[in-house]
Image: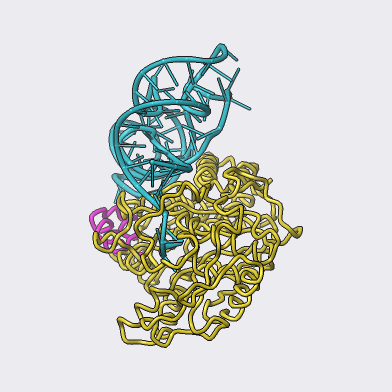
Chain colours: A yellow, B cyan
RNA sequence: GGCGUCGUACCCAAGUGGUUUAAGGGGGCGGUUUGCAAAACCGUUAUUCGCCGGUUCGAAUCCGGCCGACGCCUCCA
């Protein structure tokens, strides 16, 4: 039984899809004004992990991830660089897609862009106005009236009457009925340049929250299964989405809200000024493998803060190598595959089913790795066990995706190893050690076994 | 001020009332194996879960207080 922690109820709940066997999943995507950083990808990787578990459980998952390609930051960036909005957003969208692919994240079925769904947003805003949930302010913007929705604040457990709003509420929001009312439609301002759409309320652009409501409903229906995002989006973004969507459609909106915790870098929040700000390409340049990044981020539970440090690469590398070595050992003795999994797979699955307990499942998996290695050492392993073992590794990797595609050993390395074998047979240990160093320089570790030299990547 | 999260070994990290006198990984130490290595295996590395009380037959797990770290409170995943 799959159980997920639902932010709405603040507890783990049994997961039951609306339509048997099918899941509609919406995940908040990036605002494409800059390169996405590793903290963003922590969330996208959690969502990927969720999706892989759902797929492994046999669900047919339909996944929508939005691309926020119009908002204050994208407009500012375009202005600052003297480019058009679409120049900026296309550039960063492409970078984002590339990074997703590098990190082996299964692509969403659709990546709707906000700018292509403005009509739908306008329609939804009209519905909200008709139902007296929204009003036109003096400046031509449309605001959602928080007091018109009695459940406002239920996701984040906020009672609006008790809320002390911060100084960040800008003074130009003087015309609001309630300072906490949020914009559904923002009237055109000069600094928006040529970024605007016609609407029944004049020129302007949609408020940020509108896009997720309009696009999720368009692609997944008024009422769908799962909506994910980072914790920081719970308030106000998701709270506002719920308010808009429920009020516009008079139906329930999302059954399960899942939020991933923050990622810290070197113990603190990422900040460009401190310089602890990693993006995927930085890490790859530092010699980190995508699989190592996945390992580091998946070895902590998604609802705990994870501290990302370069030092963790070693741990990741060793863990991954351990699995690769075992796979190689099993491959040598067995090629007859059936579909069975070892008994340990049940505990592994139970851990995953308990709110995606990736660290626990990893622990169970490594415990199994040790037991199989032990049996291999003692030569007490059966064909059946080795076949099941290979299946388990394949299954494991369908969820974690931390095993790199094996690259073939270059001929030059094989030649050096063969040369070294001759020196070893002649007990010329000095020469053999020099050849081992040369192989190492080419990026390979040679291991002397009874069956001849074996290789592994550094 | 309001809401909320976290504090487990040298490091990372599960475990949220009894099969745990606390998984798993990394690191260290000792051993098996090896020409030496590598990999693998075996043993070892927290009588204890931030601190202090309480509830209970029994608590890392529940309750209260304190200390410490952190997040959100209008557009940051």
The answer to whether residue A402 of the structure is visible from this angle is no
A253 within the magenta span: no
Residue B20, position as x, y percentages in the image: 53, 24
Which quadrant, please, contains the N terminus of chain A? top right
Q: Is residue B42 above or below residue A55?
A: above
Q: Position of residue A112 (x, y in %)?
A: 56, 76
Q: Which residues are magenta?
A: A418-440
Which residue is found at the position 47% from the left and 54% from the top? Answer: A231
The residue at the far right in this view is A20
Closer to the camera in the image, A297 or A379: A297
Q: Which quadrant of the structure image shows residue A244?
A: bottom right
Overall secondary structure of the magenta section: helix
Residue A36: % across, % down: 40, 68
Q: Quadrant of the C terminus of chain A?
A: bottom left
In the rendered view, does A338 fall on the left or right side of A155?
A: right
* Location of residue A277 by image quarter: bottom left
Residue B59, given in percent of the width and then of the height, sits at: 49, 21
Q: Nearer the viewer, residue A218 or A290?
A: A218
> Quadrant location of residue A415?
bottom left
Q: Left or right: where does residue A5 sit relative to residue B29?
A: right
Q: Is residue A427 magenta?
A: yes
């Amino acid at each position: 039984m799959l159980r997920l922690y639902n932010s709405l109820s603040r507890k783990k709940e049994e997961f039951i899809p609306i339509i048997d066997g099918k899941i509609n999943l919406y995940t908040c995507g990036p605002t494409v004004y800059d390169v996405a950083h590793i903290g963003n990808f922590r969330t996208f990787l959690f969502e990927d992990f969720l999706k892989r578990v759902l797929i492994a459980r046999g669900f047919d998952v339909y996944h929508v991830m939005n691309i926020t390609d119009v908002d204050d930051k994208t407009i500012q960036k375009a202005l600052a660089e003297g480019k058009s909005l679409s120049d900026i957003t296309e550039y960063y969208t492409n970078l984002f897609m590339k990074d997703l692919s590098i990190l082996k994240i299964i692509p969403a079925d659709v990546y709707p862009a906000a700018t292509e769904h403005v009509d739908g947003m306008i329609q939804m805003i009209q519905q909200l106005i008709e139902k007296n949930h929204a009003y036109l302010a003096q400046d031509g913007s449309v605001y959602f009236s928080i007091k018109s929705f009695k459940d406002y604040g239920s996701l984040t457990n906020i009672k609006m009457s008790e809320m002390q709003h911060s100084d960040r509420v800008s003074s130009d929001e003087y015309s609001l009925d309630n300072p906490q009312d949020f914009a559904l439609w923002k009237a055109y301002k000069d600094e928006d340049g040529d970024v605007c759409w016609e609407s029944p309320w004049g020129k302007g652009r949609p408020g940020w929250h509108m896009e997720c409501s309009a696009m999720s409903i368009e692609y997944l229906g008024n009422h769908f299964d799962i909506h994910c995002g980072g914790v920081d989006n719970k308030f106000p973004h998701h709270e506002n989405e719920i308010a808009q969507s429920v009020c516009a459609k008079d139906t329930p909106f999302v059954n399960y809200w899942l939020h991933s915790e923050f990622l810290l870098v070197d113990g603190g929040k990422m900040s460009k000024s401190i310089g602890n700000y990693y993006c995927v390409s930085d890490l790859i340049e530092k010699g980190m493998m995508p699989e190592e990044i996945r390992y580091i981020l998946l070895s902590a539970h998604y609802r705990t803060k994870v501290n990302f440090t370069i030092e963790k690469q070693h741990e990741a590398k060793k863990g991954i190598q351990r699995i690769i070595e075992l796979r190689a050992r099993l491959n040598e003795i067995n090629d007859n595959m059936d579909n069975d999994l070892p008994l340990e797979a049940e505990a592994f699955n139970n851990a995953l089913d308990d709110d995606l307990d990736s660290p626990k499942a990893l622990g169970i998996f490594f415990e199994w790795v040790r037991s199989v290695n032990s049996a291999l050492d003692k030569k007490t392993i059966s064909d059946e066990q080795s076949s099941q073992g290979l299946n388990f590794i394949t299954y494991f990797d369908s969820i974690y995706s931390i095993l790199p595609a094996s690259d073939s050993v270059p001929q030059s390395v094989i030649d050096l190893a063969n040369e070294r074998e001759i020196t070893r047979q002649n007990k010329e240990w000095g020469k053999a050690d020099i050849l081992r160093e040369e192989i190492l320089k080419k990026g390979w570790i040679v291991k002397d076994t009874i069956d001849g030299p074996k290789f592994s990547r550094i």
